[in-house]
Image: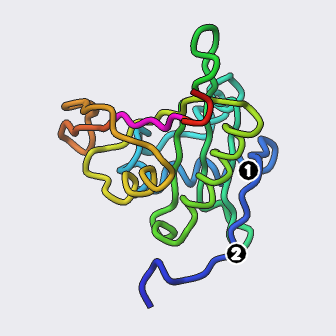
């Protein structure tokens, strides 16, 4: 059986600061998550506590399988002239990648963005070598908008990233 064919019972729900923080920190310190995101390895709980207590994310969600947090996603809604735009970020534990967790979280984020926040634009940045992430985002209507050359320093070298965005055509 390949990794993508395993059927999981994935529950996407709101992040709970009181109970989820330790597992959320563990998720973001997972080596495959660190490699695929802009997170710095070995971030202590205090760093994440300060981040989630700030206005860093308008909505923060977690994906849970068998009682364990296996993914996190969130978006931040702009303000002023960018109030109808949101910036998206997500992470999935390495052993759960390719098993529908990212899809479940994207469905929840898109529903919130479209049906509750009335966002016209969602944007994100993804490493240019993250083929699975790019394919997931394209599945949900995101399109590349250029290339950020040598965008981030990862594991001893600079890597490129793609800015991607999803525009809601029905509102234009």
Task: Name the residue that disc number 2 marks.
Answer: 9
Q: In the shown orientation, is residue 16 left or right of residue 56?
A: right
Figure quadrant of the N terminus: bottom left
Q: Circle 1 is placed at which residue position?
A: 20
Predominant SS of the magenta segment: strand
The percent coordinates of residue 74 (x first, y second) are 62, 40
Point 59% across, 9% down: residue? 81
Spot occupied by residue 18 in the image (x, y as percentages of width and height): 81, 43
Q: Which of pointers 2 and 1 indicates the residue nearer the eye?
A: 2
User: Looking at the image, which residue sits at the far top?
Assistant: 80
Depth check: 120 or 107 in front?
120
Dot label at residue 119: none
10 Å crowding of disc 2: few (<14), some (14-19), many (20+)? few
How many neighbours does mark 1 have within 10 angstroms: few (below 14), some (14-19), or many (20 or more)?
some
Assess whether residue 169 is covered by the magenta stretch.
no
Mark 2 vs mark 1, CA separation in Å? 19 Å
**Residue toward you, 122 or 49:** 122
Question: Vertical placement of 84 versus 41: above or below?
Answer: above
**Mark nearer the N terminus (2 vs 1):** 2
Q: Quadrant of the C terminus?
A: top right
Q: Secondary structure at mark 1?
A: helix
Which stretch is magenta? 163-167
């Amino acid at each position: 059986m390949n990794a993508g064919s395993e059927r999981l019972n994935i529950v996407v729900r709101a992040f709970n600061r009181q109970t989820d923080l330790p597992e959320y920190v563990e998720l973001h310190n997972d080596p495959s998550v660190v490699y695929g995101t802009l997170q710095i390895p070995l971030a202590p709980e205090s760093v994440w506590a300060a981040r989630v207590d700030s206005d860093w994310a308008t909505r923060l969600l977690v994906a849970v399988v068998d009682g364990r947090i296996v993914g996190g996603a969130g978006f931040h809604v702009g303000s002023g002239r960018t109030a109808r735009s949101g910036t998206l970020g997500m992470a999935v534990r390495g052993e759960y990648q390719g098993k529908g967790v990212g899809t479940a979280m994207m469905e929840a984020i898109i529903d919130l963005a479209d049906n509750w926040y009335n966002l016209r634009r969602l944007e994100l940045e993804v490493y240019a070598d993250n083929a699975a992430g790019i394919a997931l985002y394209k599945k949900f209507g995101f399109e590349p908008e250029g290339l950020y050359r040598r965008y981030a320093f990862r594991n001893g070298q600079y890597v490129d990233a793609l800015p991607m965005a999803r525009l809601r055509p029905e509102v234009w």
